[in-house]
Amino acid sequence: MELSGILSGLFAGIVIGLIARILVPSMQPIGCLLTIFIGILGAAGGLALASAGGWQDSFWLTFITQIVIATILVAIVASLFRRSAQ
């Protein structure tokens, strides 16, 4: 993999993670690095789902799928961190 591919994946993870964090109501006790990691996982999962569903050529549908997956992951991880802090 080239450096440009790694950097674009990292940037996509940052953007998708931040959007997902904004969409989850309440405060999340997770840090920036975990948000980026969740964003990268959401981006990869959304791309895999779009490829399996056959709509990988549609940028917006793939992007929305990535955000939905990342939002679900942020909600799950935030709830796990809240429980461990109590």
Image (cartoon, grey):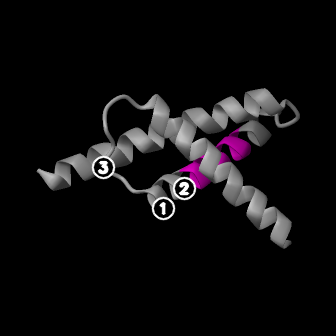
Please count the marks in the image: 3
Q: Is residue 22 above or below residue 29?
A: above
Q: Which residue is mark 3?
A: 29
Residue count near mark 3 (Cα–Cα under 10 Å), binned few <14, some 14–19, many ≥20? few
Q: Which residue is mark 1?
A: 33
Visible residue check, residue 22: yes
Q: Position of residue 13 (x, y in %)?
A: 63, 52
User: Looking at numbered disc 1 in the image, what kind of residue is underneath it?
Assistant: Leu
User: Looking at numbered disc 2 in the image, what kind of residue is underneath it?
Assistant: Ile
SS at mark 3 in the image: loop
Visible residue check, residue 1: no
Residue at horizontal 82%, vertical 33%? 59
9 within the magenta span: no
Q: Does 67 sit left or right of 1 as displayed?
A: left
SS at mark 1 in the image: helix
- Residue range in magenta is 39-49
Residue at horizontal 45%, vertical 58%? 34
Q: Are marks 1 and 2 in contact (CB under 8 Å)?
A: yes
SS at mark 2 in the image: helix
